[in-house]
Amino acid sequence: MKKRAVALLLLILVLTMGCTGQMRSSFEEKDLNTVPGIELGEVMQDGNRLAYSLSNHAGETMWYGAEIRLETEKAGKWYKVEPVADFTAEIYGLSSGSEKGMRLNLDSFKDMRSGTYRLIKTFYLTEYNELRKMEEPGKERYHVSCEFEIKK
């Protein structure tokens, strides 16, 4: 009887710990920060806001949207922090040799606590469109990331 009770308790414990509701990161380290010269600068926390910069020294224009992915580290694994609302769909260009200061309100994400986090920004490099005779975002996605700590 005791063995069954211990086994049941262990099963409940494993199920409870395994069902945190957070989705594991879909990014592997080898897929991040693969374009030399494109970086997210140091993340600074000011109350409930984060300030960081996106810099481009890659030799060509990079294209990015408003969306930023936030992930939290737990026991050596990364988990996505769910946003409260969707980001807008605009796309912006950042020419080589430029830097753009950005801000992120932590209220835009669920369940923010103290801990280790990383920002991940998706971007595209320029392709020249022969039909339109202009530069535009390419089709291949790249990702730049930066780790930081949040103190609540």
Image (tube, rainbow, N blue to C red):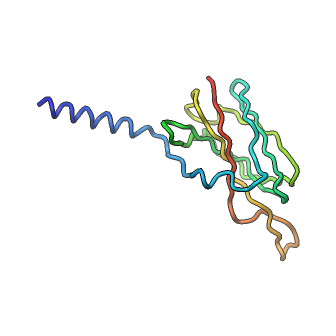
| Residue 27 on image: x %, y % | 57, 51
Foreground: 84 or 77? 77
In screen coordinates, is 30 left or right of 23? right
Give the answer, above or below, for where 152 lies relative to 118.
above
Give the answer, above or below, for where 125 lies relative to 9.
below
Give the answer, above or below, for where 33 lies relative to 18.
below
What residue is shown at x 69% (from left), y 55% (from top)?
Answer: 34
In screen coordinates, is 109 left or right of 132? left
How many badges with numbers are in the image? 0
What residue is shown at x 79% (from left), y 40% (from top)?
Answer: 53
Q: Quadrant of the C terminus?
A: top right
What residue is shown at x 51% (from left), y 42% (from top)?
Answer: 77
What residue is shown at x 73% (from left), y 56% (from top)?
Answer: 35
In screen coordinates, is 139 left or right of 126? left
Foreground: 18 or 35? 35
Q: Quadrant of the N terminus?
A: top left
| Residue 18 on image: x %, y % | 39, 40
| Residue 14 on image: x %, y % | 33, 37
**Residue situated furthest left in the rendering:** 1
Residue 150 location, quadrant: top right
| Residue 87 on image: x %, y % | 68, 46
